Image (cartoon, grey):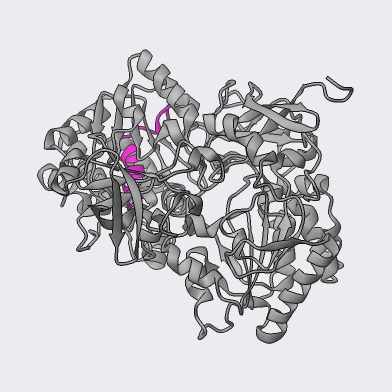
């Protein structure tokens, strides 16, 4: 091997939108990433990483879709005709386009459209926020896309208290995996489940599909989509009936328990079983198991929130350990908002003090519709897309494509790869992958804080997000010293360096070959209701919430059935090949995508294994490949989310079928409320 080409291994961190935030060992040869595997720096990772990260990341960084130079559009929107330009020309074009929008319609006509491509605090939201805050651009509420519903629901009960760390589940006597496809999107929790089961724990999976984890479970509750709140209510009522409530815990730590139970008692086992589409005996058995087990742990996934009852479902499920006193012991309670243990200083990092008073806030889910509105004041005149692939992930995909096809809206893109969304941009700025810059990584599903240095130099002319927005700030004449902050300074402003758990180190000084466990006080483990407690005004678990009543109209949880003339519920879960839409450009995601359908539903429609099928509703249609399986409950079909247009012969993916109405909390997305019909092509 030539000089300088030797293979070396460097530490890093996975930045993807996943609760695990794995530590990585990255093999570098000749300045290129050639291998990615899990490391032991983060004890939760324990040397294991998902296949998609290990197999697809080198291609993501160095493959044919990588953006390496600034580009400007020379064809029609979506046509994929661009020409290479210099960074100076690109910055000038962005400045001119945004300035035209501001001059014509004011700064709030500029909408930054970003989500969670990278989860590092610098790439995910630092200098970019400062730039748009100084500009006075529209503020974007990102939570409704994913996680916001679940987060708002949990906070409505417990405030900012972190939930139970997932690794504590090894000591649980019962683990309920509720709406969480752990082998696909929460990989390391399956190891906890396996160890608990080996020690004698019972495992229950609540999911409309018999996911892989259900194959080894003691019970699989194949619930009808969107009825989780009903099941939780019925469990609460049955637990009360069999005398399983911990009255001492309720009196000390709960408020609103009786009001909650007034709503729950309306759901008898019989009524709930009919609504949820499950056997009555499963509800009784699960209640008995939950009553007997200590510790008893519930691992909730984000799938639960993706319907119009999502927030109230989370609230109802999260109330169960309060009613039965399952908190206060190691490995008991609920896994949720665990990342709240990290002392993030987001306002300081993002300089929220720069926001002009009265600046409007826009729900991320409303951006495409608002782009089409000429009566909006101010109208959307410019959109800056980064850390996001809206055409691949938004519902009502046809509407999204129509919005981005408007020639009178200036669209800037900043990305690592040429995605479907980038093809609609006027100017594209090439961004570094996380392997090419330093960053700091808290997690939302575990308590470890990690830092990473670059493992390779920037590819081509790509720049880190922080540097791109520094240059834009300079081009716009923003002279506040905060726009000259280095990445080291940004890291130190992202995390509270005075927190004693950092051991006197600045955040930018944290070692890259280990992970820092953000324990309760620097020594004790996080055990909710033993070492950490509700962080709200009452200091209690608020099962009936004044805040929820005022903000959302639900003082206690409630159930609203989905009404549709279409007979099949379409669920779009996480993919084993993609994280959301990331890696969608890899060949592993090519070809007509699968639609999993129950054999009974297939037979009723004359559909056989491998048939091309038309999946449609009033929003649109797409063609998929039928996969017959009894792992899918009758009346429900599954097709994984995050596919790119390259998989479709019809110009639309499954996202074209997903509705735009809002969830009960957080005005969140209702992806799993899609109802469709399926027919053989």
Residue 379: where, in percent of width, then height? Answer: 57, 81
Give above or below for 628 relative to 127.
Answer: above
Which corner quadrant of the image does residue 638 belong to? Answer: top left
Residue 256: where, in percent of width, then height? Answer: 32, 52
Q: How many marks?
A: 0
Q: Which residues are magenta?
A: 311-333
Which corner quadrant of the image does residue 303 belong to? Answer: top left
Give above or below for 633 relative to 285.
Answer: below
Identify the residue at horizontal 35%, vertical 48% (top origin): 624
Magenta segment: does it hold 331? yes
Give above or below for 399 relative to 358.
Answer: above
Residue 134: where, in percent of width, then height? Answer: 74, 69
Magenta segment: does it hold 53? no
Viewer-side residue, 418 vs 676: 418
Identify the residue at horizontal 31%, vertical 36% (top origin): 248
Viewer-side residue, 321 vs 450: 450
Question: With 89 as the anchor, is 430 left or right in this view?
Answer: left
Let me know if residue 366 appears in the view: no
Q: Residue furthest top?
A: 199
Viewer-side residue, 291 vs 508: 508
Question: With 89 as the anchor, is 325 left or right in this view?
Answer: left
Give above or below for 668 relative to 455.
Answer: below
Identify the residue at horizontal 23%, vertical 53% (top origin): 679
Question: With 603 as the anchor, is 493 left or right in this view?
Answer: right
Identify the residue at horizontal 43%, vertical 50% (top origin): 150
């Amino acid at each position: 091997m030539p000089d300088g080409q030797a293979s070396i291994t460097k530490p890093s961190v996975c930045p993807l939108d996943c609760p695990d935030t794995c530590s990585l060992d990255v093999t570098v040869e000749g300045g290129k990433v050639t291998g990615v595997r899990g490391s032991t720096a983060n004890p939760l990772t324990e040397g294991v990483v998902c296949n998609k990260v290990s197999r697809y990341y080198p291609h993501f960084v160095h493959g044919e879709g990588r953006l390496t130079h600034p580009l400007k559009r020379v064809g029609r929107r979506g046509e994929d005709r661009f020409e290479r330009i210099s960074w100076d020309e690109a910055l000038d074009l962005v400045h001119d386009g945004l300035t035209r929008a501001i001059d014509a319609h004011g700064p709030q006509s500029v909408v930054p459209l970003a989500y969670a491509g990278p989860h590092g605090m610098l790439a995910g939201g630092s200098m970019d926020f400062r730039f748009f805050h100084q500009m006075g651009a529209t503020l974007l509420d990102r939570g409704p896309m994913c996680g916001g519903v679940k987060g708002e629901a949990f906070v409505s009960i417990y405030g900012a208290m972190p939930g139970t760390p997932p690794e504590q589940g090894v000591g649980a006597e019962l683990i309920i995996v509720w709406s969480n496809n752990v082998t696909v999107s929460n990989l390391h929790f399956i190891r906890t489940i396996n160890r608990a089961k080996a020690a004698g724990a019972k495992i229950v999976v609540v999911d409309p599909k018999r996911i892989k984890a259900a194959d080894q479970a003691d019970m699989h509750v194949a619930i009808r989509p969107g009825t989780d709140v009903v099941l939780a209510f019925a469990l609460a009522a049955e637990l009360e009936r069999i005398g399983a409530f911990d009255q001492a815990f309720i009196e000390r730590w709960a408020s609103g328990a009786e009001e909650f139970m007034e709503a729950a008692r309306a759901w008898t086992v019989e009524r709930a079983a009919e609504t949820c589409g499950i056997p009555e005996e499963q509800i009784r058995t699960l209640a008995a198991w939950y009553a007997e087990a200590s510790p008893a742990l519930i691992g909730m996934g984000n799938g639960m929130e993706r319907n119009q009852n999502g927030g109230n479902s989370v609230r109802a499920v999260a109330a169960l350990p309060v009613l039965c006193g399952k908190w206060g012991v190691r490995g008991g309670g609920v896994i949720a908002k665990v990342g709240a243990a990290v002392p993030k200083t987001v306002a300081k990092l993002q300089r929220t003090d720069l926001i002009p008073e009265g600046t409007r806030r826009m729900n991320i889910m409303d951006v495409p519709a608002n782009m089409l509105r000429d009566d909006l004041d101010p109208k959307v005149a410019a959109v800056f897309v980064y850390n996001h692939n809206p055409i691949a992930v938004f519902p009502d995909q046809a509407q999204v494509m129509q919005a981005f096809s408007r020639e009178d809206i200036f669209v800037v893109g900043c990305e690592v790869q040429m995605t479907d969304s980038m093809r609609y941009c006027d100017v594209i700025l090439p961004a570094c992958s996380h392997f090419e810059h330093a960053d700091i990584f808290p997690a939302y599903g575990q308590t470890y804080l990690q830092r990473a240095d670059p493992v390779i130099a920037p590819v081509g002319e790509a720049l880190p997000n922080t540097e791109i927005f520094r240059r834009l700030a300079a081009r716009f004449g923003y002279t506040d010293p905060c726009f000259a902050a280095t990445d080291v300074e940004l890291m130190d402003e992202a995390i509270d360096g005075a927190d004693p758990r950092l051991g006197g180190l600045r955040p930018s000084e944290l070692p890259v070959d280990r992970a820092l466990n953000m324990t309760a006080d620097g020594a004790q483990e996080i055990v909710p209701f033993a070492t950490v407690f509700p962080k709200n005004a009452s200091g209690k678990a608020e099962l009936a919430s004044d805040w929820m009543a005022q903000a959302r109209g639900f003082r206690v949880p409630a159930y609203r059935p989905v009404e549709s003339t279409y007979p099949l519920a379409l669920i779009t879960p996480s993919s084993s090949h993609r994280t959301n839409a990331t890696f969608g450009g890899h060949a592993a995601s090519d070809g007509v995508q699968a639609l999993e359908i129950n054999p009974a539903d297939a037979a009723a429609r004359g559909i056989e294994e491998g048939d091309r099928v038309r999946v449609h509703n009033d929003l649109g249609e797409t063609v998929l490949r039928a996969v017959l399986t009894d792992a899918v409950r009758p009346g429900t079909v599954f097709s994984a989310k995050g596919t790119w247009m390259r998989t479709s012969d019809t110009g639309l993916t499954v996202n074209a079928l997903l509705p735009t109405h809002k969830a009960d909390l957080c005005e969140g997305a209702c992806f799993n409320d899609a109802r469709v019909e399926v027919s053989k092509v």
